[in-house]
Amino acid sequence: MDHRLLALVTARPCPQHHYPAPAPEHPPCDSQSTGASSSSSTTLAIAIYGTPNSFDPTQLLEGQQTYIWDSVYDTLLIQDNKGELRPGAAQSWHYSSDARTLTLKLRTGMKFSSGTPVDATAVKATLERIGATPGPNQGVLASVASVEAPDATTVVIKLKRPDGSLLTSLSTAAGVIGDPKTMTSKSAALNPVGSGPYTLDKGATVNGSVYVLKRRDDYWNKKAYPFPTVKIRVISDQTAMTNALKAGETNTGTVDVSQVDSFKSAGFETQHVQATAVATLVLADRAGDVLKPLGDVRVRKAINMAFDRAKMVKQLLRGSGGPTEQIFNPKGPGHDPALDQTYSYDASAAKKSLADAGYPNGFSVTMPSLVFTKPFEPTFTQALADIGIKVKWQPVPPQQSVSALASKKYPMFLIVDGLNTTPIEARNFYSPTGYRNVFNSSAPELTKLLDQANRELDPAKAADVYKEINKFGVENAWYGPVFYIGSDWATKKGITYLGDGSSTLATIRQFGTAD
């Protein structure tokens, strides 16, 4: 498996329980141990595939560049390595009974790297600016009606409608806190001022090449960041990235599954994560407006029966992953193992289902050929051809990938998405405005379930609703999920990778030091 794919997918934070507020027994993050000593002198050196687009709080992208901005900025909430929401800059939070008002209480004593105190006014200014500025996170805050700062440590977010994904969003890019004095300046794109655990060392940083982070000794959660210095290199080639790890230019990174044994032999510690992304055939045109056959659920079910998922995992991923028939993270509360028994690989049954729907000779479809789908296209082409569906792949330049998928030009398309939290997966894939639901599909039963999930403040009850949403999606074949993609981490002696796939947020908190 070429791990460049994982750099190109949306690697967002992963599953957590739908907490309306931190449970009383939850310790604050500064009391959590990473299994590492904050007095370590080890430098963490890691590589990323591309140059960060911007450090302006309104333009932050998730994925590998999160390693940098998540280190410079505090977020209101954070996710631990098990994907659980924990206090961040907000030491506590509470929803009103109607799930329309979220009140956050900020911890005291925080300061931006400029020395300016962090207060509710700064939080309000940042949230309002993100919500008002076109960018990757503007839509994430679409449910926010207003933000109030009644005093220096209290932030009150009033919602237009209940939003079950908001808490998770406040632990990612939409929840950063910028310095109101500097975040509107042009310099914010390259010289961010935050209150996070690290500052960007401008003297040692070369934009587009290497980013050096220096830890702040006065940071409130210093224990979670055992590395005084973090060096992040931009290396766009997988082979060069692997060579940098072997040569000691970096000391942690993902490696191809075929090289795991050689890294073990060289003294590296390795850690396999079974699922960090999911490859899915999005059957987007469920009304059949552009491609009439997709409007028939029997056609969509036939497509789901066309894939020998286990064989594809073995051949395409060399076993580093697993078959799936659902888009939800396997470690999240919305995942249901029973749903993976819905569609057995059966080309004959798929052909019959197509014939029953009125397409005994199949049909033709044009799908976008994207940089991350190319390795998989021959296999998908053959699998669909075997049941009578002829695929033509239309090349799309990388910079046009997002706009192409959102254009409604393509009734079905293949994507590789980083796994997420269950509330955000439900929003992205099943909400009428979800970015993967590009034809804005809806159904009365689904609308009711989504509303119920957004309003539910009990995490156990919310999990049950998300399972029902997942069941609806699988049984109505809204998507054709095929396999989870895994990853293999290699770390030099003295460094340990702490993740297990519960959270795929690219954060320095995933790494610790080892004796």
Image (tube, rainbow, N blue to C red):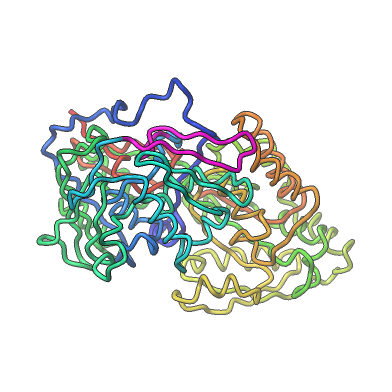
> Is 380 on the left-hand or right-hand side of 140?
right
Q: Name the main secondary structure of what is drawn in magenta.
A: strand
Location of residue 318 in the rendering, given as x and y in whole percent from the top left corner: 47, 50
Is 207 contained in the magenta span?
no
For image coordinates 45% across by 51% down, the residue present is: 12
**Count the marks: how many?**
0
Task: Locate residue 483 relative to residue 22 in the image: left or right.
Answer: right
Residue 23 left/right relative to 269: right
For residue 347, which quarter of the picture? bottom right
In magenta, the rendered stretch is 86-107
Q: In terms of depth relative to the viewer, which is nearer, 202 or 63?
A: 202
Rendering quarter of residue 189: bottom left
At 46% from the left and 22% from the top, the residue drawn is: 24
Name the image quarter holding the C terminus.
top left
Name the quarter where the N terminus is drawn.
bottom left
Nearer to the camera, 127 or 44: 127
Point out the residue furthest to the front here: 150
Q: Is residue 259 visible?
A: yes
Which residue is painted at 73% across and 61% down in the image?
Answer: 441
Q: Position of residue 208 (x, y in %)?
A: 23, 68
Left or right, 77 with respect to 242, comes to right
Residue 40 versus residue 433 in the image, above or below: above
Q: Residue at x 50, y 32 (%)?
A: 21
Q: Position of residue 379 (x, y in %)?
A: 58, 63
Query: Where does the image place residue 359, in percent across and percent down from the top left?
Result: 85, 69
Compare residues 140 and 303 and report the one nearer the observer.
140
Q: Looking at the picture, tell me which residue is in the foreground, 464 or 326.
A: 464
